[in-house]
Amino acid sequence: MPADSAAILSPSASPHGRPRPSIRDHPVYRVLPPDAQQRLTAEGTEVDLPGDAQPPLDREHLWFVLSGVLGAFPTGSEVCVAPIVSGAVYGWDHALGSSGSRADVRPLLDVRLFRVPAAAAREALGHDWLSRFIALQAVQRLTLLEQEAACNASHRVSERLAKWLLRLHHGGNGAPLRLKQAQLAAMLGVQRTSINAAASNLQAMGAVRFSRGKASILDAGSLSDLSCRCGAMN
């Protein structure tokens, strides 16, 4: 996707008057060396993307997730293999000059991002630092993918749905989950009828309410109890 397509520059305050999260609030940015922070701030841009944005994020930037949730999708698939939540960063391997994963990454919820040209990030942080960091991330990524594959093979749809709703709820800092059941079915790689049954079960338990393309979390504790808890965020 071109750098500016589907990207909307954001004002400093939300429509509700609350301060919008900025790059200075991001936990990864805050532990970077001061000179690297200055370079990234000077080169970067804050953008908003809606949850229904279809073109994937480009591979020419490093993306700091300030709010909302991104999802990673194998090319040509609607099955989401991993969430990328607030406080995370997508594109470290791009900053190193590697093509990295071929998964498409796009919003699951409305997201606020801070994007930095990959070349600027590489120059600011240095090749050695990035190489060590990406090696560590690769091990973590492999572990998560193995865990997700095992979960998909061994747990009921209702347990997996509860897990994903928790991921989105916590990863998006409690933001409204505007997701239709058909979207959830595609994300989990199951039939819509299976999602309908699972959603009805969770709703009957009082954990969540589904209405007009929106999922409202009523009791996160109960939802956690009903989840398979594979990689769930508490």
Image (spheres, helix red, strand yellow):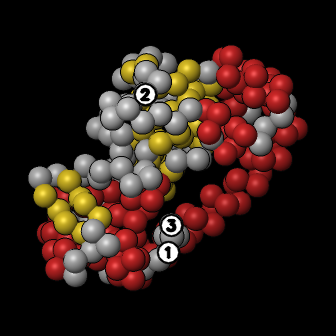
Q: Secondary structure at mark 1?
A: loop
Mark closest to the chain's N terminus, 3 or 2: 2
The amino acid marked with disc number 3 is Met
The amino acid marked with disc number 1 is Cys
Is label 3 or label 1 in front?
A: 3
Residue at left offset 36%, top offset 50%: 175
Q: Which quadrant of the view contains residue 11?
A: top left
- What residue did someone put label 3 on? 233
Q: Looking at the picture, how far across and down is residue 27, in whole percent?
A: 67, 45
Q: Looking at the picture, how far across and down is residue 118, in whole percent?
A: 67, 26
Q: Which quadrant of the view contains residue 218?
A: bottom left
Residue at left offset 39%, top offset 59%: 169
Asked whether, in this view, residue 98 is left or right of residue 83, the answer is right
- What residue did someone put label 1 on? 230
Viewer-nearest residue: 15 or 170: 15
Instruction: Using a 10 Å C-alpha cutoff, classify the residue at mark 1 as few (fewer than 14 neighbours), some (14 to 19) or many (20 or more).
Output: some
Mark closest to the chain's N terminus, 1 or 2: 2
Asked whether, in this view, residue 41 is left or right of residue 167, the answer is right
Q: Is residue 56 visible?
A: no
Tag 3 near tag 2, CB within 8 Å: no
Residue at left offset 63%, top offset 66%: 143
Asked whether, in this view, residue 195 is left or right of residue 161, the answer is left
The vertical placement of 110 against 182, above or below, is above
Q: Looking at the picture, how far across and down is residue 234, in whole percent?
A: 51, 70
Q: Which quadrant of the view contains residue 191?
A: bottom left
Viewer-nearest residue: 71 or 227: 227
Rendered-image quadrant of the N terminus: top left
- What residue did someone put label 2 on? 13
